[in-house]
Image (cartoon, helix red, strand yellow):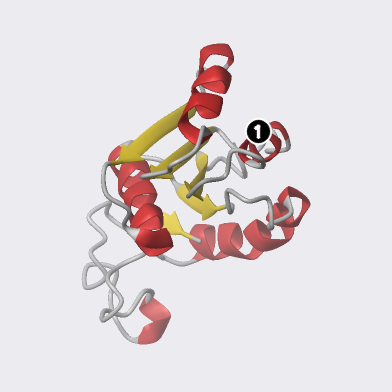
Amino acid sequence: MYHNNTMAAVVPCYNEESQVGTVIETMPALIDRIVIIDDACQDRTAGIVDEYRKKDGWITLIRHDVNQGVGGAIATGYKWCRDQNLDIAVVMAGDGQMSPEDLPNLLDPVSAVKRQLHFEQSDRHAPISPLAGASPAACGDRSHGRPKFVCI
């Protein structure tokens, strides 16, 4: 939980057996769910994630039968987070190249925007905030002025 927002880390993985355990172990406490996308890995990534899942219920593993690339894996994770009614989803690379310590610096401005504006992620062709010249309703906000879901 971060500033009263439920948070998930979306972790796209393709053959990350050597790093995915470290990514899971270093995830900060402000993350409520880890959503790992196995993008048709050919190694032991899914097996390693399953071992962590047995110990910790906050990890979700979604497996692609066909490799969709990092963009497809991220989109799958974002959709899962949206469907679970989480407030914020961030991407953390499965190879450990992103530092979890950077999350608060990234999240503070987003959390402030989410609280102060009626911000909601929308499709890439639509304005994403009232400041861009659209009302919350035009951004797809069906929550009567409450922000819904932000993808970072």
Question: Residue visible at 37% across and 77% down?
Answer: 130
Q: Position of residue 85 (x, y in %)?
A: 34, 39
Q: Position of residue 103 (x, y in %)?
A: 69, 54
- Describe the element under mark 1 as helix, strand or loop: helix
Q: Position of residue 149 (x, y in %)?
A: 38, 53
Question: Residue visible at 38% across and 63% down?
Answer: 71
Q: Position of residue 92 (x, y in %)?
A: 59, 52
- Foreground: 143 or 12? 12
Question: Residue visible at 37% across and 51% down?
Answer: 78
- Foreground: 28 or 127? 28
Question: Residue visible at 27% across and 54% down?
Answer: 144
Q: As drawn, which residue projects farthest toward the front?
A: 42
Residue 143 to residue 24: above or below = below
Q: As drawn, which residue projects farthest toward the right?
A: 101
Residue 121 to residue 25: above or below = below
- Foreground: 94 or 26? 94
- Compared across the picture, whether 21 is left or right of 9 comes to right
Q: As drawn, which residue projects farthest toward the top?
A: 55
Residue 47 to residue 136: above or below = above
- Foreground: 38 or 90? 38
Q: Is residue 87 visible?
A: yes
For disc 1, the marked residue is: 21
Q: As drawn, which residue projects farthest toward the bottom?
A: 133
Q: Residues within 10 Å of mark 1 (few under 14, many from 20)?
A: some
Type of the residue with mark 1: Gly
Q: Is residue 120 visible?
A: no
Q: Quadrant of residue 127?
A: bottom left
